[in-house]
């Protein structure tokens, strides 16, 4: 899919914050934002919440089973109230939380079992999904950038996220998918929204 326009990305983040504010106030959510084709298309999305740079919640819908707006709405509520790693966000916390939205392209399977991982995975471009039966692990493309992982380590960590052996991606029965994401986030809590440059890295 085409790159998300900056205006659509700004709208996505603003909408995600308004959804969280409304839901935490009285479990209502605002009306959909004005139609923009890039967000009314069927897309996946993730919403990430941080407090002073520390993760506070991250939930998403990786597959395009709904419109981008619907995925953002569901993910915003989920990030604030359903991430099992954290207690639900309180309304009082919102003034210290930054909101980030990743609007996803459609995941595509890759054949990482048949050759060098460097042929398939590029840091700063690709998000990864590893699945086997009922187990699935997903990491957004910004994760390996912030942690300075190589493509091999990135795949290994995604396998671990799925609760599978670190080298499971080499098993032909395991599905490995990659996806792109346009990432937008607040520069400060409830502040201006900017596109986040993932700094696509050269193959390592």
Image (tube, grey):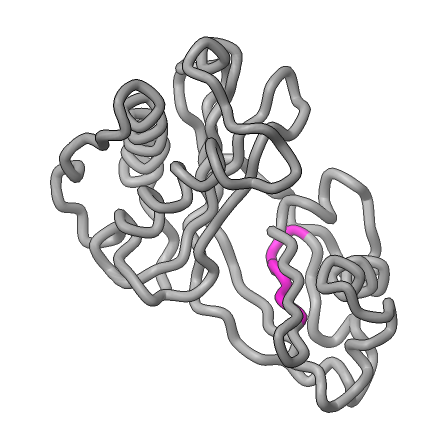
Above or below residue 108? Residue 40 is: above
Q: Position of residue 189 (x, y in %)?
A: 47, 14
Q: Residue at x 84, y 60 (%)?
A: 204
Q: Is residue 169 above or below residue 34?
A: below
Answer left or right for 4 relative to 83: left
Give the x, y percent position of residue 64: 36, 65
Pick the residue in front: 109 or 19.
19
Task: Tell me, yes or no, whether the highlighted magenta stretch contains residue 56.
Answer: no
Residue at x 74%, y 56% (from the top left corner)? 202
Rendered image quadrant of residue 145: top right
User: Is residue 97 toward the left or the right of residue 84 in the image?
Assistant: left
Residue at left offset 35%, top offset 23%: 24
Which residue is found at the position 74% from the left and 58% from the top? 161
Asked if residue 59 lies left or right of residue 140, the reply is: left
Task: State the image coordinates of residue 194 (x, y, percent, origin top left).
Answer: 44, 28
| Total tally of numbered discs in the picture | 0
The picture quadrant where one finds residue 75 is: top left
x, y percentage for residue 155? 77, 65
Q: On screen, 66 above or below 27?
A: below
Return the residue nearer the eye: 77 or 52.
77
| Depth check, front residue: 152 or 156 | 156
Above or below residue 90? Residue 123 is: below
Quarter occupied by the N terminus: bottom left
The boundaries of the magenta stretch are 124-130
């Amino acid at each position: 899919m085409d790159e998300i326009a900056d205006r659509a990305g700004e709208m996505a983040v603003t909408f995600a914050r308004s959804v969280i504010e409304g839901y935490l106030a009285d479990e209502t959510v605002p009306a959909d934002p004005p139609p923009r084709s890039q967000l009314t298309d069927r897309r996946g999305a993730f919403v990430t919440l941080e407090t002073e740079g520390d993760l506070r919640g991250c939930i998403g819908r990786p597959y395009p089973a709904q419109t981008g707006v619907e995925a953002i709405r569901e993910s915003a509520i989920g990030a604030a109230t359903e991430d099992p790693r954290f207690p639900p966000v309180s309304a009082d916390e919102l003034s210290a939380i930054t909101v980030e939205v990743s609007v996803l392209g459609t995941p595509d399977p890759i054949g990482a079992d048949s050759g060098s991982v460097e042929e398939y995975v590029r840091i700063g471009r690709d998000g990864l999904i590893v699945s086997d039966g009922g187990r699935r692990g997903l990491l957004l493309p910004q994760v390996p950038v912030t942690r300075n992982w190589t493509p091999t380590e990135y795949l290994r960590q995604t396998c671990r996220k799925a609760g599978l052996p670190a080298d499971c991606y080499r098993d032909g029965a395991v599905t490995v998918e990659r996806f792109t994401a346009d990432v937008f986030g607040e520069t400060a809590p409830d502040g201006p929204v900017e596109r986040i440059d993932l700094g696509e890295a050269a193959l390592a």
